[in-house]
Image (cartoon, rainbow, N blue to C red):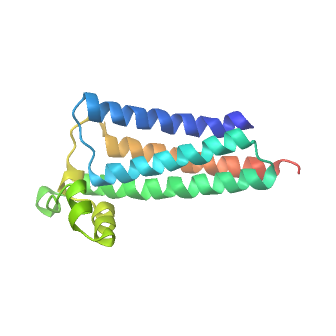
């Protein structure tokens, strides 16, 4: 069962690695919503790596799957918000705000989180596509797959004997 917990951890680690490759070698700086999605991917890596190392029983398997699923739902919502921003008509796109480092230095933390989660005009920009989908659209698909996989893992763990 451990390999079934390791699979989403490895998938998310690969997605994070590719995101960092795009940032540092392709010059694509992440927007605020991209940074939040990276945070969700990282937390999913941590949860499922812990599950793979732990090799949980029935109750633990359900718990790990539930936590992983909730994190994937958070990422799904964030990616959906970015996809929505990317499909807005140009006149309805919110203006670009200050960068993250400026906000952390000058805004209260609650305002920083509000700005991060609502996104800005830079979150609506599409600079990269693969098979016709933007990074945010691919991320949305991956988070949906992670939600479904977590549900499957939870039911698989539930059906195991104690």
The percent position of residue 57, horizontal first and vertical second, equals: 80, 48
- Given residues 92 and 122, the one toward you in this image is 122
- Given residues 25 and 94, the one toward you in this image is 25
Q: Residue at x 27, y 61 (%)?
A: 104
Relative placement, left or right, of 95 versus 119 is left
Quarter of the image with the N terminus is top right
Question: Which residue is outermost to the front?
Answer: 105
The percent position of residue 146, horizontal first and vertical second, equals: 54, 46
The percent position of residue 72, horizontal first and vertical second, equals: 51, 52
Residue 131 shows in this picture: no
Question: Which residue is outermost to the right?
Answer: 162
Give the answer, above or below, for where 95 lies relative to 142: below
Residue 150 shows in this picture: yes
Q: Residue at x 75, y 42 (%)?
A: 55
Q: Residue at x 49, y 36 (%)?
A: 13
Question: Which residue is outermost to the top?
Answer: 25
Q: Residue at x 73, y 50 (%)?
A: 61
Number of numbered markers:
0
Give the answer, above or below, for where 97 lies relative to 140: below
The percent position of residue 112, horizontal first and vertical second, equals: 29, 65
Asked where in the image residue 114 lies, by quadrant, the reply is bottom left
């Amino acid at each position: 069962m451990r390999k079934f917990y390791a699979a989403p951890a490895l998938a998310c680690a690969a997605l994070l690695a590719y995101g960092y490759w795009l940032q540092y070698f392709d010059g694509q700086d992440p927007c605020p919503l991209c940074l939040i999605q990276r945070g969700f991917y990282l937390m999913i890596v941590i949860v499922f790596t812990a599950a793979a190392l732990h090799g949980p029983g029935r109750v633990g398997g359900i718990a790990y799957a539930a936590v992983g699923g909730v994190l994937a739902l958070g990422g799904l919502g964030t990616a959906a918000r970015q996809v929505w921003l990317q499909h807005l008509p140009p006149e309805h796109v919110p203006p670009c705000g200050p960068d993250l480092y400026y906000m952390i230095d000058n805004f209260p933390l609650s305002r920083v989180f509000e700005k991060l989660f609502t996104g800005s005009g830079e979150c609506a920009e599409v600079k990269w596509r693969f098979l016709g989908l933007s990074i945010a659209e691919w991320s949305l698909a991956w988070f949906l797959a992670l939600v479904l996989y977590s549900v499957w893992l939870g039911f698989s763990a539930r059906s195991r004997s104690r």
